[in-house]
Amino acid sequence: MPLAIAPPISSRRAHLSSTLRGWLACTGVVAAVAATGAEAAPAEDGMAFFENKVRPLLIEKCYNCHAPEHKVKGGLRLDTKEGTLTGGDSGPSVVPKEPDKSLLLRAVTYEDRDLKMPPKQKLSAEEVDIIRQWIAMGAPDPREDKVTAAAEGGKKGPQVGMSIETGREFWSFKLPVKTEPPKVKDTTWAKTDADRFILAKLEEKKLKPASDASTDVLLRRVYHDLVGLPPSPEDTAEFLRNPDVSKLVDKLMATPQFGERWGQHWLDLSRFAESSGGGRTLPFKDAWRFRDYVIESINKDVPLSRFITEQLAGDLLPHADAEERRRHLTATGFLVLGPTNYEEQDKGVLRMDIVDEQLDTLGRSFMGMTMSCARCHDHKFDPIPAADYYAMAGILRSTRTLKNYTDNVAHWIDSPLPLDGDQETRMLAKETKLASMDAELAAAKKALKKLSPKPVKLQRGQPVDIDDLPGIVVDDAQAKRVGTWKESNKYPSFVGEGYVHDDNTGKGTCTITFSPTIPKAGRYEVRLAYMALVDRSKKAPVAILHADGEDTVYVDQSETPPIDGRFVSLGQYRFEKDGAGYVLLSNEGTKGFVTADAVVFIPVEELDKVGSEEKAPKDSKLVAMETKVKELEKEIKVTRRDGLVRPEAMTVLDDKKPEDCAIHIRGSIRNLGQVVPRGFLTVAVHGDAPKIPADQSGRLQLAEWVTSDRNPLTARVLVNRVWMHLFGDGLVRSVDNFGTTGEKPSHPELLDALAIQFMQDGWSLKKLVKQLMLTRAYQMASIPSAEQMKEGLAADPENRLLWKQSRRRVDAGVLRDAMLTVSGTIDMTVGGPNVLADSVDSNSGGAQNLEYGYIYTDTRRSVYTPAFRNKRLDLFDAFDFADINQPIAKRNTSTVAPQALYMMNHPFVIEQSRKAAELIMQRASATDTDVDLVNRVYQQTLGRQPAAGELKLAAQFVKINAHAASEEELAKMKLENWALLVQTLFASVDFRYVN
């Protein structure tokens, strides 16, 4: 028999409870900490790791037994730093930097048979690794022994971080103040007021600014910063004839490529991606519309205040026509595009995880604040009490981001977009026709069901549709999976579209939970479908949670299932209507493959009707109805695809019942404190805040407050970011942290003056960019004279006072686009989709195949390269593309060996080098010498002529010396030499850096 009974074992339930995703560093410094680099992580990154990963894990898994609010077992408190280090009855629980000597790690790994914690549910491998990494870092821990106000349910308690009153005196929470430009000794150097602010600081330190950049260096810098492409030789020649920077800036800003370049900066902040991430990653088929909206808005110079408002509340704005309505709806994709675990079964946790991620994104993107730190407690460092966090959370909780909170795998909202004029009229007629046909089909299916005979005995060795099975069917595609399950349809006797197995690996880490929706209370026979083979587990544990408790049975999956060759009965159990029952299959303690196909719940009173009758002859009415259903389905399919198709966008919508939010004590959705009215950050409110009507979410008012000239943060943050993109560092170097743990501005009066001017100029990005590019400071050389370099490094080694321009490495996208441009293969098509994906069935196990199986072959600009969360272009991985799981204001810039190896060996680089060489050969005239061609290659690739030594070496390198070779062989050798020369230039520092 393939079945054996075992006593109830509650520990078999190996659900991974959801950690509080999306938490970011309370220190305000965000850094990904890889396992391999944990020990070398700086202190502030260790605190970030604790707040982001460790604290939520301890709260979720340990506080029930090791915190005084519940109970303290074994004398061990894990809710304080002191308690964690001191340990309990067994001794110190954590030995910093020595994971192997730490009792805490030994307990959670279950390596010690007498010390297993948590006792009822082993942590996942990922969670154990978090503990290991944290200890290896030195167990950084900012916690204090006192209970915070948030932990007390929002009651008045000791302020852990900065008080509101003190916060109002901090520089970033004061309104900008305009200061007259200072007087300077050198009255000839400054071109603009911004230059005077900079020169005054230099003169205080007796420093002289660097000389002006050379014309070719300045040209390449302007092209890089404005459009992210190298200038052509023709562009260079034109600028050398008339080096007017103002005209050049206007010319480049008028091209679509300006929006593509600066749109990428905004997409980094928007954590833009085209998939959800996670194990069952789901493709965002319409994310490209948001990307195009961003590029179009920047090209049209939509005021950034309006731009932000549309992204927070576009669906609530009035519109003049269908085009404007499409823009407004598409803009709200900003709130949807985050990394979301749509498989999370606790929908309350999922809802708050989404809200937290949205708050974190808008806080850091628009205001430079790490608001997520206040989810569990008052912010440790900034004047953000938990009450303010939940005041803003109430706004986003009153916003619908998901279709519903009941689906097994949740789904975002796909909103239909209006069409223009006659197109909309024709589309409405088509939709009316389809609605009528859908209603007719539903009625026909209902009639067919009544006419259909009782179920027939299932045929072995053939797939079976879910609808052909009796009772309540939960297929593997609808089940909740934990761990790595491999999908298969190798053996055809499966239910639905296939089955899953554990690939005989990861023992003890894989579970699959089948949760039925029980329509009527009663007793049900529970049947498990699996694929039997000799290499299957002989003792696969299956836990059944029912109305009377929990039972565990063991299934011998090497034996053929006794019912129709598909099913084994797990027994008969009582279930309540809409109860919390489930069937959980795991691979804990198994040897051999564990498979899962489907679970069927059949009311016991219907068992005598199942699978016993032979197929009865069909009567004429049945045949006619079957024919009608098939014809209707075919007609609907053709009609849907014929003619116009209504576009859709990922959007949010206002909830029908907006409501204020209660403080979640320690961030738990099940431990609620006082309800706080919807509102904003108290410390950043100057004057009267917008009033939120009871029947609205408050997003419109949130956008009004964020973009108000009475908000001290937003304009400063935006101006600082633009400065960073043009100068390498912001005036505030911590560009996404304007809190107390961030850096103070190097030129506070200049920052305020720019912010005020920016708002007075109507929040125009183009005016601000041009204003900064016309400064003398922007046009300085990045490599000054030896004497200036010596003096500057001695007085200001980090160049905070801007005595020279910064030498900057080009980012991953610009590097790729430059290679494609030099090779002549770049596709300059603007906008439109880049990944063809049909509507996504969230419950389909194959939804992620688009991403995991995707092969990158496009040659469009990098802003259009598919932005998947799990699978990135190799070049992007190597050259520090932004982490699209969070808003990134400034990308990391690393210098590591794999980058050099990529440029030396990757097929993409080799291919583009060869194509560039072919282009050189095609364009060469009969009179061109090797020296002429070398000059041309250098100009196209590096934006300059070669130095004398470079010219000599390159000419010698491409010269062919094989006199005895045939003409064909000589041509091949010549092409190979030129390709190697181009590849050498691609790999050079001058190609990868902008001076």
Image (spheres, grey):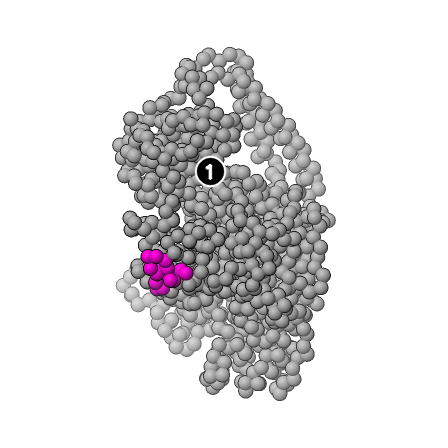
Magenta residues, start to end: 83-97
Residue name at image x 62 percent, y 79 percent = 197
Q: Is residue 103 left or right of residue 891?
A: left
Residue name at image x 62 percent, y 65 percent = 164
Mark 1, residue position: 844
Q: Is residue 87 magenta?
A: yes
Quadrant containing the N terminus in the rendered view: top left
Q: Which residue is nearer to you in this view: 404 or 951?
A: 404
Residue 653 image position (x, y, % from top left): 63, 45
Residue name at image x 62 percent, y 47 percent = 399
Q: Is residue 303 visible?
A: no
Against 884, is 484 above or below? above
Q: Which residue is nearer to you in this view: 648 or 471?
A: 471
Against 119, is 30 above or below? below
Residue 339 image position (x, y, % from top left): 50, 51
Q: Is residue 864 left or right of residue 768?
A: left
Residue name at image x 61 percent, y 36 percent = 643
Category of crowding for the residue at label 1, using alpha-carbon neighbours closer than 10 angstroms: few (below 14), some (14–19), many (at least 20) = some
Residue 250 image position (x, y, % from top left): 63, 66
Quadrant of the rendered image containing residue 458 = top left
Residue 890 image position (x, y, % from top left): 51, 64
Quadrant of the rendered image containing residue 713 = bottom right
* Type of amino acid under label 1: Ser
Which secondary structure is most common in the magenta stretch? loop
Q: Secondary structure at mark 1?
A: loop
Q: Which residue is nearer to you in this view: 683 or 358?
A: 683
Q: Which residue is nearer to you in this view: 621 or 232?
A: 621
Against 627, is 8 above or below? below
How many numbered discs?
1
Q: Is residue 889 left or right of residue 123?
A: right
Q: Is residue 969 magenta?
A: no
Q: Is residue 655 visible?
A: yes
